[in-house]
Image (tube, rainbow, N blue to C red):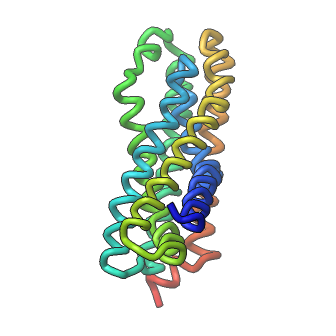
Amino acid sequence: MDVTLFSILSLGFILGIKHAIEPDHIIAVSTIASRSKKLSQSALAGVFWGIGHTATLFFIGITFILMKNSISDKVSMSLEFLVGVMLVYLGIVNVLSANKNHRHDHGNHSQYGDKHYFVKSSFIGLVHGLAGSAAIVLLTMSTVNSFWQSATYILIFGGGTIAGMLLFTTVIGIPFVFSSSKKEINSLFTIISGFISVLFGLYYMYNLAINDGLLSLFFK
């Protein structure tokens, strides 16, 4: 492999790790990690988020690269806005879930199925992938020269996001896992993660709509 290409792909992996720890990603996955009963479950939530995220980036990214096209600002920012909506929704679900579990026995909560858990993580990653497609397409087109290099770069970038999210969801899951037997403390942590998600989601949408001009793109 060419030394320059190897350096570019290595940088892509590092950028993927950096991309994984962006605030909206960490906050969204923390709402899932808050349901963890085991660290392995929390870690796998990050892996499945990364898989969903990478799948979306790859298919949309490759499509636009083949079409030699880019995503318009209006579409790109609308997809970003969807992330804000999702953060608010996830936060509300967490708060309501914590309140419900505080009033009732934990028996049913502990049966929160792994399958549902991981599907939800993948879906969150998929939505984030939609929102990040424009940026990764532009980055890829400015970095590599061929279709196969573009495909490889996106996959390597995705591998970095999976690795980064695996690490950080494991760390995020620690307080939730170790407090899982202490109903009140666990509920408090879950409510806090929910409120953070709601507040950040509202800020995210406001910033896109007003400061970044999404509303003006629809009404100009």
> Between residues 89 and 125, which one lies in front from this camera angle?
125
Horizontal and vertical percent for residue 76?
46, 72
Q: Tell me: residue 31, above or below residue 210.
A: above
Q: Residue furthest bottom?
A: 220
Q: Is residue 80 left or right of residue 192?
A: left
From the top left corner, tell me how far across and down residue 95 is, in percent: 56, 33
Tell me: 100 left or right of 171.
Answer: left
* Residue visible at 55% across and 36% down in the picture: 31
Asked which quadrant contains residue 34, the reply is top right
Residue 202, position as x, y percentages in the image: 59, 57
Residue 77 is at least partly visible in this image: no
Relative to 76, say whether 107 is above or below. above
Q: Residue at x 61, y 49 (%)?
A: 17
Give the vertical position of 119 relative to 148 (above or below).
Answer: above
Q: Residue at x 60, y 15 (%)?
A: 180
- Tally of numbered tags: 0
Decide which of 192, 8 is in the foreground and name it.
8
Does residue 117 appear in the picture of this structure? yes
Q: Residue 178 placed where, x, y %?
A: 66, 15
- Name the residue nearer the viewer: 220 or 120: 120
- What residue is drawn where x is 44% and y is 38%? 48
